[in-house]
Image: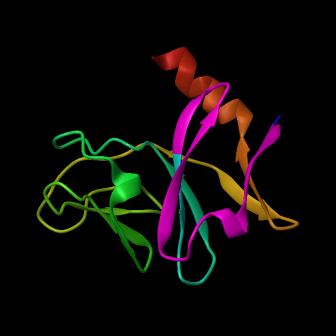
Amino acid sequence: MSTWIDVSALDAIPRRGARVVKTALGCVAVFRTAEDSVHALDNRCPHKGGPLAEGIVHGASVTCPLHNWVFSLETGLAQGADEGRVATYPARVEGGRVLLDAAFLRGRVAAE
């Protein structure tokens, strides 16, 4: 059973940008595309630990600010010749608020 937690107003996240949100279950990078699609990922690039929330959002991807690795916001998979994956979390927008699946976040905490 999913329990959604409210983490931010959609308008608090710039289009083609991101914010790191702190929850009781850990920090998550929340990205907003130009089309107002919202995605939640770990903030740490698996390559060198770059802060993905400081990367460039283009289409449904984000480019790590340290070494330009590109990750799909939908799957978390590295694109092109790079290999690796960033954990993704269910996110949705309801009434102008960004919601994350608390059960999914709890699973992440339990696995750490």
Q: How is the image coloured?
A: rainbow
Q: Determine whether, in the image, residue 69 is placed left or right of residue 88.
A: left
Specify the quadrant that holds the C terminus.
top left
Is residue 49 shown above or below 111? below
Residue lying farthest right? 95
Q: Where's residue 101, x and y in %?
A: 71, 42
Residue at far bottom of view: 35
Q: Quadrant of the N terminus?
A: top right
In magenta, the rendered stretch is 2-28
Give 98 or 83, whichever is nearer the viewer.
Answer: 98
Q: Residue at x 13, y 57 (%)?
A: 67
Residue 23 part of the magenta-drawn span: yes
Residue at x 23%, y 59% (from the top left corner): 65
Q: Where is 89 relative to 79, above or below?
A: above
Q: Quadrant of residue 30?
A: bottom right
**Residue 14 counted in the magenta span:** yes
